[in-house]
Amino acid sequence: MKALRQRVLRAVVADVAGHRPSCARRGLPHTAMVTLERQSCLLPRRLFSSETAKEDKANNAEAPPSDKDETAQEPAEEAEAPEAPSAVLEKELAALQENVRARKHELLLSLADFENNKKRFSKEREDRRKSSMANFATEMIKVYGQFDAFAAEKHTGAVQGLHQGVALTRDLYKASFERFGVRNIQVEIGEPYVAARHENVGTVESTKLPMNAVGEIVRPGWVLEPDSPKPVVLQKVEVHVSTQGPKVPAS
């Protein structure tokens, strides 16, 4: 069987090369002859198909890439291309400048809040200081009033020494008041009556004074820091208001 296959193969090769020896000459059987003829017809086709496939494959391998492939590769190459150092530095600089502007804006807002709070706290502190001082001075004025009332009386004999001591204490009290901004409210007879500084405790009839004016001073008044923008009246001046004479407008 093996020898028969070799003889058939030699016959096929000879047929392809142009030599078609007779099967009978070689002593081949009829079946082998038919097989030989079929293979001799199919072999050139197979060889041609194989050669054609090899050529197509080689042509495809040697053919340059199409425009579509180049277009698809361009974005990838562009995406993979690194940015220039100058462009990177410019972006970083822009980001840092924006951060600086934002921080500066926050700092300015913080400074504005600080100044507003500082003014508010200063005002509140000043108000508390003035309020506490006014309360303390009001109580001291009451004590001063008792000393002044005792000193205004006339005493003789053994009480005269006590009278002088009380008068001296009254004067020391008044000096201390003035040192801390507590002063008498200056009032003159005949000036218009002002409800913010005067307290009407009675009336006086006088043809020499204008109507609704200060006719008599009953008790002195006191004011805290009279030269400040907002003086505080600690005690109003008790006065008698005139009821006769020409009417003057109250200020």
Image (spheres, rainbow, N blue to C red):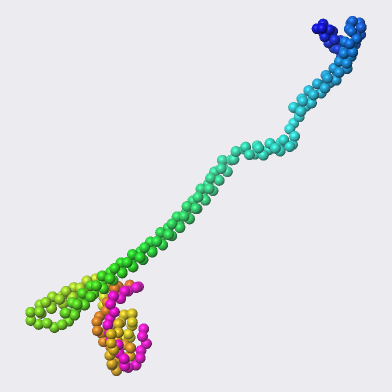
Residue at 16 percent of width and 79 percent of height: 150
Residue at 86 percent of width and 12 percent of height: 12
Residue at 55 percent of width and 46 percent of height: 91
From the top left corner, tell me how far across and down residue 24 is, in percent: 92, 7
From the top left corner, tell me how far across and down residue 64 is, in percent: 74, 31
Foreground of the two, 32 or 219: 32
From the top left corner, tell me how far across and down residue 9 is, in percent: 83, 10
Q: Is residue 117 visible?
A: yes
Q: Which image quarter: residue 35?
A: top right
Is 149 magenta? The answer is: no
Q: Is 167 displayed left or right of 198 in the figure? A: left
Q: Tell me: residue 99, above or below residue 51.
A: below
Q: Which image quarter: residue 174?
A: bottom left
Is 241 magenta? The answer is: yes
Q: Is 7 displayed left or right of 203 in the figure? A: right
Foreground of the two, 33 or 177: 33
Residue interval drawn in magenta: 229-251
